[in-house]
Image (cartoon, helix red, strand yellow):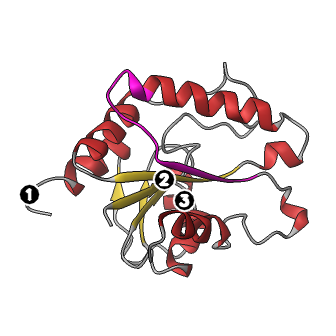
């Protein structure tokens, strides 16, 4: 199956250390929307795996999260793109759940949804948790410098062999190039 998995905050949209708590604060990078549409046109299903502990912390609720994702869907549709599946973890980190990245639960949900093995599927993220989750399921981690990516690079923890790109669009440029 042709599948690419993306983290949300910092990869698709601007991130904030104060959390994305409202539809107004959910601001996709325009080039990320175009990149997702290009993946779709190339025949790739696109899934999202996102920690949303702001729900567990009481900053926003599931209806607000759904509204953010509806905004994303509408903005992608204007560019001819779509997300095929979103897996999200609403839990506070103290809940010690199996779905919160770096644990592999969200990626396992995606594998079940598509009835596929994630071995060698690309997972694009901006944090060590994304890289660790990808490795836990045999997926290929990719790091982007947007969001928390620059901080992740500065820490250089566990990045051996992980390709790094300026943003999702530059990853997609390389990923879809005939030489790849």
| Residue in the picture at 37% in, 60% down | 3
Give the image quarter of residue 87: bottom right
Q: Residues within 10 Å of mark 1 (few under 14, many from 20)?
A: few
Q: Nearer the viewer, residue 166 or 106?
A: 106
Q: Quadrant of the C terminus?
A: bottom left
Of the two numbered discs 1 and 2 in the rendering, the one whose residue sits closer to the viewer:
2
| Residue in the picture at 83% in, 56% down | 91
Name above or below for residue 72 compared with residue 107.
above
Q: Residues within 10 Å of mark 2 (few under 14, many from 20)?
A: many
Name above or below for residue 97 compared with residue 6.
below
Is residue 27 among what the camera can see? no
First in sequence, mark 3 or 1: give its number: 3
Q: Residues within 10 Å of mark 3 (few under 14, many from 20)?
A: some
| Rendered location of residue 36, percent (x, y) | 36, 41
| Rendered location of residue 128, percent (x, y) | 58, 66
Q: Can you identify the residue that label 1 sits on? A: 178
Residue 151 belongs to the span the image colors magenta? no
First in sequence, mark 1 or 2: give its number: 2
Q: Tell me the element at label 3.
A: helix
Q: Tell me the element at label 2.
A: strand
Q: Tell me the element at label 1.
A: loop
Q: Can you identify the residue that label 2 sits on? A: 47
Is residue 67 among what the camera can see? yes
Distance from disc 1 to disc 2, alpha carbons, whole Å, reads: 23 Å
Q: Which stretch appears magenta?
A: 76-89
Name above or below for residue 141 compared with residue 38.
below
Mark identifier at residue 36: none
Of the two numbered discs 2 and 3 in the rendering, the one whose residue sits closer to the viewer:
2
Q: Can you identify the residue that label 3 sits on? A: 152
First in sequence, mark 2 or 3: give its number: 2
């Amino acid at each position: 199956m042709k599948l690419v998995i993306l983290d949300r905050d910092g990869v698709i949209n601007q991130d904030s250390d104060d959390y994305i708590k409202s539809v107004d604060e959910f601001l996709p990078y325009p080039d990320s929307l175009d990149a997702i549409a290009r993946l779709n046109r190339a025949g790739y299903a696109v899934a999202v795996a996102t920690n949303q502990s702001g729900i567990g912390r009481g900053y926003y609720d599931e209806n607000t999260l759904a509204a953010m994702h509806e905004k994303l869907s509408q903005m992608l549709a204007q560019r001819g793109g779509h997300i095929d599946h979103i897996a999200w973890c609403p839990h506070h980190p103290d809940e010690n759940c199996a779905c919160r990245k770096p644990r592999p639960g969200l990626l396992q949900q995606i594998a079940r949804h598509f009835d596929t093995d994630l071995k060698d599927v690309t997972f694009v993220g901006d944090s060590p948790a994304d890289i660790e989750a990808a490795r836990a399921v045999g997926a290929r981690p990719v790091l982007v410098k947007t969001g928390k990516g620059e901080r992740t690079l500065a820490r250089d923890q566990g990045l051996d062999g992980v390709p790094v790109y300026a943003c999702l669009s530059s990853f997609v440029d390389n990923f879809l190039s005939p030489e790849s």
